[in-house]
Amino acid sequence: MSVAIRSPAEYLRLYFLIEGQYIKARLHYRADFMISSVGMLFSSLATLGVFAVLFSTIDELAGWSFMEMVFIYAFYMVAISPMQILFDQFWFLRFDVRQGTFLKYYFRPLNMMFYYVSERFDLKGLTQLVLGVGLLVYSSLRLELGWTPGRLAILFVTLLSASLVQISLVVAAACSAFWFINSWPVLSLAWKMREFAPYPMTIFSGLMRITFTYILPIGFVAFFPSQLFLRPETVSGVVWAAPFVGIGLFAVTYLVWSRGVDAYTGTGS
Amino acid sequence: MSLIHIEDLSKHFRVLNRREGLGGAFRDLFSRDYRTVRAVDGVSFDIEPGEIVGYIGPNGAGKSTTIKMMTGILKPTGGTLLVNEKAPYDNRIHQAMVMGVIFGQRTQLWWDLPVIESFRILKEIYKVDRRTYDEHMAMFDELVGLSALYPRQVRTLSLGQRMLCDITASFLHNPRVVFLDEPTIGLDVSIKAKIRSVIEELNRTRDTTIILTTHDLGDVEALCRRIIIIDEGKILYDGGIDKVTALFGTYRTLKVQIDESCETKVDAVRASLDRRFGPDRGITVACREAPWTNITIDQDRTPLSDVLTHVMGAFAVSDVRIVEISMENVVRRVYDGALE
Amino acid sequence: MRSYLAVVRGSTMMGMVYRFGFLAATVGNVVYLGVAYYLWKSVYGDATTIRGLTFDQTFLYVALGSTLFIVLKTYVDWNLYSEIREGIVAIYLVRPIDFQLYMLASCTGFFLLSVATLVVPTILLMVFVFQVSIPLSAPLALLPFSLVFAFVLTFCFDYGVGLSGFYTESIWGISTVKDTLVLVLSGALIPLQFFPDTIRDILRWLPFQAVYYTPLSLVTLPDEGWQHVTRFGVQVGWMVVLLAATRVLYGRAVKVLRIAGG
C-alpha cells in the first residue's frame, strides 16, 4: 500500500483550486446555465407537484400531513444535492472506460476517485440545493419544529449520511461500466430509484418495505432521517442506524470502484 | 541500480473463448471456456537514467501491456519490475510523482480551462516550488513561444499546440522518467521536428529518461540511441539503433502492379530476378497486398534502380510505388534472424 | 414509402439488441407499480371512490400510464441533438428523404417492440397479480389509433426539443422541462380527475393530456361516451398542429445552418 503524500486538507485545497477554475470556465455559458437551472427546478419539483395535487383531495397520507411531506421532500432534495453536484462525472464513466480516456486518471499522484470526482461540478444542482434548504426552513417553521443546536447537529449528520447513501447507490451502479458494455440501464435504474425516496415508508408493507430498507435503502435518503425530527416518539432502532448505513454503503461502493480500477486494462494491447 | 529494472517479466490474460452462434452464446452462459493470452512473456531489460529508448513492435506485440505495467496500471503476473527502485503497481501515487506520461491522441490537460490554469493546477498537484515552475515555463516560452497559448482553452488548440502543451505539462514536475506514446501522430512535418527537438533538449538538460513507443520511424531515428523490439510478448532485439538503422535504412520495397493478379506472377517475377541478378542478392518477392507484387530490396546488395529497370522491361507494369520498409517488416526481419 | 419501412425494420432490430435496456426498464416499472399500489391504497384509505374513481380504476390507470411512458420513450430529442453536435445532420440534407418522416420512422421500431414486450406483460400482471379487472367496451376500438397518435404527439415534443439543439449548447434543460410538463400535466402519474377543477379545465385543452389521458381513459373509463370522441378529436388536432409546427421549425433551423455553415 502506498502512503498518501497529500493530507485531507491539501486535497481540499486542490479541490477548490480545480473547481474554482472549472466553474469560472462554465459560467461563460450563461444561457446554458440559466436554462439548465430552470430545468432542474422543474424536475426537482415534479414529485412534489404530484403530492400537492393528491393533497387537494385528501388531508393526510398514511397519517402524514402535507407540510410533513414537504419537510421530507425538502430533506430529500438537500440530501441528493451532493450526489448531483459533486459526483456528476460518473454519468460519463461508461464513455471514459470505453474510449480509454479513463487511463489518464492513473497517472497523477492523486487518489483516483478524488481526481475523477474533481473533473466536474454541476452548477445547476445548486438550484435544487437552495430550493431544498428553503423548503426545509419553510416547512419546519410551519410545523413549528424547535431547532436547538443539538437538533441542528443531528440534522447535519443525518443529511450527510443520507447523501452518502444516495452517492453510494448511484456510483456503484455507474461502476458497472467497468465490467459491462451496456451499463447504462443499471445506472439509469439506480438513479430512478431516488424518485421513491420522498415517499413515506409507512405506506409500504412486506417485500417493498424490506426492499427499500435493507436492499435498496433509499428509505435512508429522506424518510427515516426525517422521522427523527417529525415524529421522534415513533422512531425505531432502524433509524439510528442511519449514519452507519451511509458510511457502510460508501465503503462498499469504494470497494467496487477499487475493484473496477484494478480490473481495467484500457483499450488495445 | 538502474532506473528501470525488468527481469523475466510476464503478464498473462485469461480471455473468454466466445463460442459461435446463438447456441454457442447460450452455452457460454453456463460453461465458460478460457484460454491464456501471454501478452508479455519473460521480458528482461535495464534502463539507465538519461537514456532515450525506443520501444517498438507491431500491434498486439505487448508494447502497451509492458508500458501499462511500468506505469502502474497493470499488475504483473510474474517476474521483477522496479521503476526507481519501487514496484509501480503497489506504489502508484508515489511513482506518479516522479513519472510523466504523454498519450499522442488524448490530452491530459483540463479541456475547458485556459492552458495556463492546467499548468497551475499541476504545479499544485506535484508540489512544484515557485522557482522551478517559473524556470520551466520560461524555458518553454523560449523554446516554442508557449506564452501565446496561455489564455486559450485547451479545446480550442490545434493538435500540434496541444501536444506542445502536453509535453510542457508532463515535464513540469521534473520527472525522472517520461513515457511517450505516439507523441507525433497526426502532426505535420514541421511540428514533428519541433517536438523532437524539444524532447531532445529536455533529455539533454535534465537527464530525463525517456521511453518512446511509436510507429513513426522518424521519431525513433531522431531521438533514440537504443531500441528494444518486442513481438508476441518477447524481446527480439535490445541494442543500439545503428544496427537497426542499417536494417531499415537501406531497404526499400518496390511495389509493382502487373496486369494480372499478383499470385500468378509472383513466381515468374522471382524467377526472372533470380536469372538476372543471381540468388542471395537481398531481393525477396511476395504477394501480400494484392494486386501489388512486393519486391523488397536490400540496397546494400542490389541497387533499386537496376531492379526497377529489369522488372519494367520484363513485365507489363501498370503502376509502381516505392516505399520505405514498414515497422512490421523490420520486426519480421529481426524475427527471421536478420541481426544474427 | 419502402425506404421508411426499411428504417423501421432496422430500428426494430436495433431494439432487440438493446434487450438489457428493456429488462431494466421492466424492472423499474415493476418497482414503480409496487410503489404506486401502496401509495394509492393509502390515498384511498377507507373511501370507495375519490373524485368519481374507484381504487381499481385509478390503479389501472396509473399502471398503464407508467407502462405507456416507457413505450412512448423515443430518445429522438437526444439522438437528434447528438447528430446536430456531430454535424451528421448535413448528411441528411443531401439525401432524398423527408427529415421529419425519417426521424419518425427511426423511432417507430422501438415503439412497436416496446408495445409488444411491455404492454402485454403489464396487462397480464395487472389482471392476474393485482387482481384488477379491465372493462371491455365500445370505446376500446379507438385505442389502437389513440395509441399511435399519442406516439406521434410524443415524437413531436421530442423532435421539437431535439431541434432546439441547433440553437443551444445543451438541451438538457429544455428536455427536462418537457419531460416534467408531460409527466405531471398529462395525467400520466395521476388521473386528471384529481386535479383541482380550474386547473383541470385548462389542462383539458393542452396537448399533454392528449398523450396520456386520452388513450388511458378509453380503457379505464368506458362510460364516458362522447367525451372520448371529443378528446380523440383534440388529440388528432394537436397532432396535426405540432407536426406542422415542428416542420416549420426544422425548415427555419436548416436555413440558418445552410447560410451560416455547420
Image: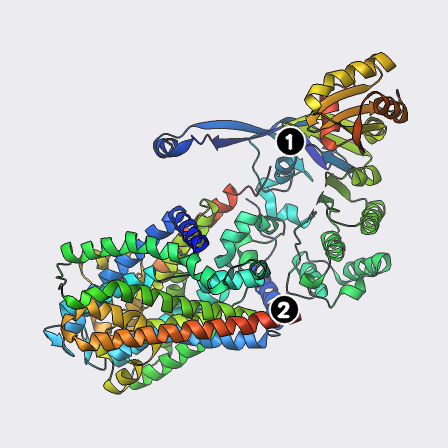
- In the rendered structure, which amino acid carries the disc numbered 2? Arg
Residue shown at the point (55%, 59%) measured from the top left:
C92
Q: Is residue A30 visible?
A: yes
Name which quarter of the figure residue A179 lies in.
Answer: top left
Residue A184 in the image: x percent, y percent? 43, 53
Quadrant (top left, top right, bottom left, bottom right) of the C terminus of chain C: bottom right
Name which quarter of the figure residue C211 lies in.
Answer: bottom left
Q: Nearer the viewer, residue A15 or A61?
A: A61
Residue C228 in the image: x percent, y percent? 21, 74
Residue shown at the point (85%, 56%) measured from the top left:
B143
Label 2 near label 1: C-beta < 8 Å? no
Q: Secondary structure at mark 2?
A: helix
Same chain for the residues under marks 1 and 2 in the image = no
Q: Give the labeled residue for mark 2.
A: C258
Q: Is residue A75 visible?
A: no
Residue A30 in the image: x percent, y percent? 58, 77
Q: Nearer the viewer, residue C221 or B55?
A: C221
Q: Give the labeled residue for mark 1.
A: B61
Q: Secondary structure at mark 1?
A: loop
Disc nearest the viewer among 1 and 2: 2
Residue shown at the point (61%, 36%) measured from the top left:
B65
